[in-house]
Amino acid sequence: MMKSIWKTVLGLGLASALLVGCANTSNSSKGVKHIGILQYVEHESLTAARKGFIDELEKEGYKDGDKIEIDYKNGQGDQSNLQSISEKLVKDNDLVLGIATPAAQSLVAASSETPILFTAVTDPVSADLVKTMKKPGGLATGTSDMSPINKQVELLQKVMPNLKKVGIMYTTSERNSEVQVEAAKKAFKKAGIKTVVKGIASTNDVQDTAKSLMDQTEVLFVPTDNTIASSVTLLSELSKEMKIPVVGGSADMVPKGVLFSYGTDYEELGRQTAQQALKILKGKKAKEIPAEYPKALKVVVNDDMAKTLGVDVSSIKEN
């Protein structure tokens, strides 16, 4: 009786193995590649990057469900989520994409062989994702969303030529924000403008910190910061109430109340990243593909907010 049971168990195990083998062979024969996508948190810039990535792949003949299968996950801004999701994505996919710095870092930490792409990462080098932009040197490459801070300061001076003091707010746990803030402090100092810098730990700190900075300064500057982006409506209301413009951040924050931004077109950045993905899908190693800065930068202005604040933005709308 016991022998009979073992024969049955072994038979079922063998049958299962054969089925799995057939499924993998079938997938392989069709040339289907599995792509995992991990987005750090839900907000428009990161979603736009994801959309551009998927749309560009489809445009190039790699449609989800045809030549590729996409496994999309959102970390909801939770580090423990990122870790567990990353481990599964690198195990189950041929290629993975991390959208925003924390997601990309989590994927890199989890992978020992799966190639990694990243996008919407401000400084890939300081985030330890690549050795250098030209020679990544590891399993990862991708696109940065870094926009020239000097240009933002230049535009702000055109709009407010008598500007003397700027408040800067950022999230202390976001490495991408720290990098931009350091660059902003140097750029404002060079322009002869004083800065007051305050960090926040979470969205709970946004209102009090922003109000404190607006009390002390003439403008509030924010970097492309995931936490602040999720609280942009609150900043907009404070801006109207205190008559203090908010500038910087990502382009998608402008329609929600930021006066203007000069920065990355995130959908185009996703498309740019997809072109790198195509190289990997065709056999090139990530370390052989240089990481890139955004090719599409633009000035976006909120005319309604300019009117509400009594600020003339005509000088920068020509850029």
Image (cartoon, rainbow, N blue to C red):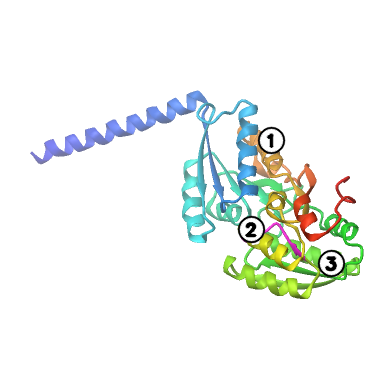
**Which tag, 3 or 1, sits closer to the chain's start?**
3
- Give the answer, above or below, for where 318 lies relative to 153: above
- Give the residue type at disc 2: Thr
Q: Nearer the viewer, mark 3 or mark 1?
A: 3
- Give the answer, above or below, for where 311 lies relative to 18: below
- Give the answer, above or below, for where 230 lies relative to 276: below
Question: CA gap, disc 3 to disc 1?
Answer: 34 Å
Residue 225 highlighted magenta (yes or no): yes
What crowding class fits label 3: few (fewer than 14 Cα within 10 Å), some (14-19), or many (20 or more)?
Answer: some
Name which residue lies at 51% across and 43% down: 72
- Give the answer, above or below, for where 30 lies relative to 138: above
What crowding class fits label 1: few (fewer than 14 Cα within 10 Å), some (14-19), or many (20 or more)?
Answer: some
Residue 149 image point, x, y percent: 81, 58
Looking at the picture, tell me which residue is in the foreground, 225 or 112.
Answer: 225
Question: CA gap, disc 2 to disc 1?
Answer: 34 Å
Q: Mark 3 points at which residue?
A: 186
The N terminus appears in which quarter of the rendering? top left
Tell me which segment is drawn in magenta.
Answer: 220-229
- Give the residue type at disc 1: Gln
Q: Mark 2 points at which residue?
A: 233
Could you say whether the residue bearing mark 1 is in a helix, strand or loop?
helix
Label tally: 3
Residue 18 image point, x, y percent: 33, 30
Name which residue lies at 59% across and 48% down: 98
Residue 131 image point, x, y percent: 71, 54
Q: Name the residue under label 1.
A: 275
Residue 156 highlighted magenta (yes or no): no
Tell me whether the residue at label 3 lies in contact with that at label 2, contact meaning CB atoms closer than 8 angstroms: no
